[in-house]
Amino acid sequence: MAFVVVLGLGKSGITAARLLMKQGKQVVILEERNGTQLSKLARDLLKEGITVRLGVSLNYSSLKEFLPLTRIITSPGIPWNHPALNYCREQDIPICGDTTLAWEACGRTPWITITGTNGKTTVTHLVGHILSYTGFDAPICGNIGIPVNEVILSRKNVGSALPDWLVVELSSYQIESAPALQPQFAIWTTLTPDHLERHGTLVNYRLIKCSLVEKASHQILNGNDPDLRASASMWPQATWVTTDPTISLPGYIKPTLWIEAGQVTTQQGPLFSTDCLAMLGDHNQQNLLMATAVGMQIDLEPALIEKAFRCFPGVPHRLELIRRYKGICFYNDSKATNFDAAESGVKAVKEPMVVIAGGQAKYGSSKDWIKQLRLKARAIILFGEARGEFSMLLETNQYKGEVHSCLDLEQAVPLSLSIALRCQCQAVLFSPACASFDQYKNFEQRGDDFREKVKALTRIDHISLR
């Protein structure tokens, strides 16, 4: 009997296996991890007809017992060039990611895909909100934590009652494992060095993003991004947006949407005021323009787009205002997992402020981030694995404000309030500039922890400043 092997017992692997079962395939999931919770999950899946093998290392030997394999479905967390996968390719075994399965099952539904180093989750939420507000069935899914196959499975019958649109956030990991994907729209928000531990170079990272955008029927690109502007000649038919109408794009390319005198503007004139979106920062004005561009492309009335923005609730962990306490605003920007995103957060929040940063350090240039800290932060509290490295970085770059070191947010949050009151700061900004994996499962769990600790603040105890 021919098997389809699914690698990984995460959300994407489970939903892929369930979709394959609905399609009549014989499915087995292989998972390297083991444990009580995973064993229970494996037993539950077996009741659905899905076999799970735990504690199985990823190598060709572990796959041989399932030969002949009709296909391997890999997890986004497994490198696309993993030696075991390369060996399987040499044996002519087809390999793809779970996004490819979704495309095959739901390709006749138009896809709006959003990718980029920073900003993609906010744009995904904005586009989904606009479409839902204007009456479309347009679920958001993908890299935001909801696998596309979960959306497909939520419909009673695969292939029927499908959405009007799928709004899909895609990471570079997902794109490289879905070469067949041809979306109706591809929105590219930004490109700065990230995930280089996986992709090796910025060139490789850029090429993966390009591989999605070039196959889309319509491209929407952010003219504020220097890297995208530098390659503008590759996309002569794209819709370009910018918050700065003076930005020069190469050759004959002109922006389609821009901001002028506080108005979203086209060649025909102003559409609506940018204050309709209650999110801080120039980067969120860029996000507003990209989402607006989608609405305009599918002929939505500007007045409806504006109304949708006015009731947009925001996105957790992205400059999320947790509370105002003792005159100080506490912002959760846990999604700022690199220097560029953290720089945008500092730029967006009104100074003076206390910044909490740290976690698991990532590759990238800290120059612009530190420049903003010098301008706006009276104190910086460092926590987690990177606190020593960041302390040296700040000292080397002659940051003149206070620098404090904590083990974790349990210490950092009450300390931030104490310092903010003493230094008469308007805000405490939690914008880590780091990955979360030293202390948390993901940035969402980290942001939730920050939110809980801020909401628990009721008094200031004596805190020894370190």
Image (tube, rainbow, N blue to C red):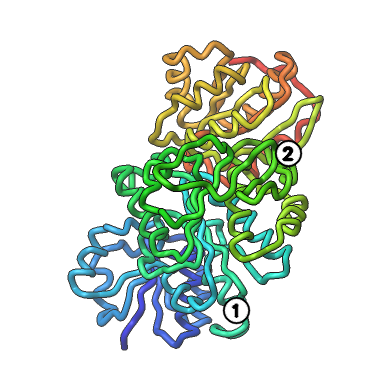
Q: Camera-side residue: 403 or 114?
A: 114
| In the displayed structure image, the side of residue 344 where residue 28 appears, left or right | left
Sort mark 2 into few (<14), some (14-19) or many (20+) by Cα contacts within 10 Å: some
Q: Position of residue 282 (x, y in %)?
A: 61, 36
Total number of numbered labels? 2
Mark 2–mark 1 Cα distance, whole angstroms, equals: 36 Å
Residue 322, numbered circle: 2
Q: Position of residue 23 (x, y in %)?
A: 46, 85
Quadrant of the snapshot with the N terminus = bottom left
Q: Position of residue 332 (x, y in %)?
A: 65, 38
Q: Position of residue 293 (x, y in %)?
A: 59, 55
Mark 2 or mark 1: name the one nearer the start of the chain: 1
Q: Camera-side residue: 45 or 143?
A: 143
Q: Residue at x 68, y 18 (%)?
A: 419
| In the displayed structure image, the side of residue 333 where residue 78 appears, left or right | left
92, above or below 85, in the image? below
77, above or below 183, in the image? above
Mark 2, mark 1: which one is toward the viewer? 1
Residue 162, numbered circle: 1
Q: Which type of secondary structure does the marked residue at label 2 adopt? A: strand
311, above or below 156, in the image? above
277, above or below 162, in the image? above
Q: Residue at x 46, y 45 (%)?
A: 117
Callout 2 amino acid = Ile
- Asked whether residue 36 appears in the rendered view, the answer is no
| In the displayed structure image, the side of residue 422 where residue 68 appears, left or right | left
Would you identify the image quadrant in which residue 100 lies? bottom left
| In the displayed structure image, the side of residue 121 where residue 276 appears, left or right | right
Quadrant of the snapshot with the C terminus = top right
Sort mark 1 into few (<14), some (14-19) or many (20+) by Cα contacts within 10 Å: many
Q: Camera-side residue: 284 or 437?
A: 284
